[in-house]
Image (cartoon, rainbow, N blue to C red):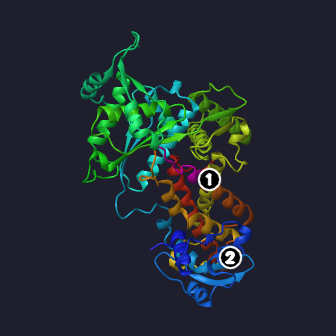
Amino acid sequence: MRLGVEETLGALNAALGPGGPVWFKETRARHLRVRDFLAPRRALQARFGDDQVPERVVHAIVGLQGPGVAPVLSCAPTPAGLALQLRRSAVFERVLGAVAAYAAPTVPAAPGPRVVLHCPALCGSPCALRLSQLRAVLVADHLARALHAHRVSVRLVPAVRDPHMPTFLQQLRVDWPAASERAATEALRSRALAELTPARNAEALPPGALGRVCLKELVDERGRTTGYDPNLDSCLVTEDLLAVLAELQQAVQDWAEDSSLGLAAAPDAGADSCMVVHVVSCEEEFQQQKLDLLWWKLDDQAPLRQKHLVCGPVKVAGAPGTLTAPEYYELRHAQVCKASALKHGRDLAQDPAWMEIFRVLSVATIKFEMLSTAPQSQLLLALADSSISTKGTKSGTFVMYNCARLATLFESYKCSMEQGLYPTFPPVSSLDFSLLHDEGEWLLLFNSVLPFPDLLGHTAALPCTAPGLHITARTEMVCKFLVQLSMDFSSYYNRVHILGEPRPHLFGQMFARLQLLRAVREVLHTGLAMLGLPPLSHI
């Protein structure tokens, strides 16, 4: 079984006896020089009074064992609290001897609830897509990937119908289905016609509108305690609205097998066994609330669990608020091409291989900008060229640059090995990980490789049973993690010469370091895959 940060924290807290969690994992380099976990002094005083932690408790902590619990070297009182250090060479050996287990999400023992992800921004055309709607699309795509990775059965709605939208989504590396045929709306239309309220003052209805349906009763029944806008009173029913409802209805009723993952629908495939998550921009939320209530009004089998993941507004510094999603992409693409021309001293825009790299870099820039902030918070975009620099440590370009550096490192080793300078890579079981004593090496393992499965789990966690209409998602976690990983790797790579002189007495440390960086590479590639981004071999 793999070691886990959460398993270790759970065992440490249990060893202190009854009470809330006390221990936390250190992340900063200056603290990791002396400890890996800390139980703060004030928290211990609240638990044990002014007396010291009993010796028997400290002794039990040092001898901690259990599934997923990291081996402990020492535990001692300090002015900051109870400081614990792990047996680092043993942790290196356990983790780097099973890299695949740490570079992939933990598959739950039992399947989670079925999830319908609905992103209404995809009902239109790309040229009408505002930046706040683009943000909702990218959040929905990222959340779908995270849920799929954890074997959650997901349906994506709506299937896009605009002929230009599939091309634009492919450009953005967003994986979303295209429509083949429309879902039947006859039953919903009949029910809607029966529920229509008389027109007020001979109200003129727009084309495609059937009339209005009163929602006030449902708002009074459900809305006041769950978060629906109390000003909702009626909904104008249109053919387009019925088409959206029909597609949502079909997604719930006819849960098909997800052939791409080989997953079949759960045995309890009724409407109550799934959750519908509407991923909407803040401008779309009011209309989406109307659609929710209308669904309940017209369909007795509508799911009881409908949640809204509302993405905050997107503000653009120094630019008009009318910038569309395609214009934003073209701007970033032009900036990437310009930066590359300055770096390489020539225009590479006509080289097909480089053009694909430029497209990936453009999308990476956009996704890291859009996803590095918690989705419910306001996002401020800066459109200056500095946003795509490989020297800035917060950008998607910086992450892709370090991905390419890792690829170059392993390609250099391969070429040198083929020339006879280095031996072939030995079995991992024969490596001596006690040779890894640089603080940057522990930083990479302890902050990046070891906690990665837990991070993926948090990204895919949806509060299914939380009360209320609105939910949050941690879609910012992967981007922030990859940025920090890239910063730690860049610092280490700039300071430590990995491929040393071809002398036999230096090979042991070199191979231990390469195995660590193999793990870093695999974690980085998995994280990028959660964003729909391929690894790059050069920039």
Q: List x then y, in percent, for residue 181.
A: 30, 29
Residue at horizontal 27 percent and vertical 41 percent from the top: 253
Q: Horizontal placement of 230 versus 197: left or right? A: right
Q: Is residue 514 left or right of residue 340?
A: left
Q: Position of residue 35 (x, y in %)?
A: 68, 76
* Type of amino acid at the residue the image marks with label 2: Arg
Q: Quadrant of the N terminus?
A: bottom left
In the rendered structure, which disc, 2 or 1, sits on the residue that comes first in sequence? 2
Which residue is nearer to you in this view: 277 or 525?
A: 277
Secondary structure state at the residue bearing disc 1: helix
What residue do we see at 66% from left, 61% from top? 489
Residue 509 drawn in magenta: no
The segment highlighted magenta reads 469-480
| Residue on which disc 1 sits | 480
Amino acid on which the number 1 mark rests in the picture: Lys
Q: Is residue 312 above or below residue 57?
A: above
CA distance for labels 2 and 1? 24 Å
Residue 195 falls in which quadrant of the image?
top left
Residue at the spot x=46%, y=40% of the render? 224
Q: Nearer the viewer, residue 299 or 214?
A: 214
Quick one: label 2, few (<14), some, or many (20+) residues within 10 Å?
Answer: many
Other residues around mark 1 within 10 Å, as few (<14) / some (14–19) / many (≥20): some
Q: Main secondary structure of the magenta part?
A: loop
- Image position of 483 (left or right of 4): right
Q: Which residue is mark 2?
A: 35
Q: Is residue 67 above or below residue 119?
A: below
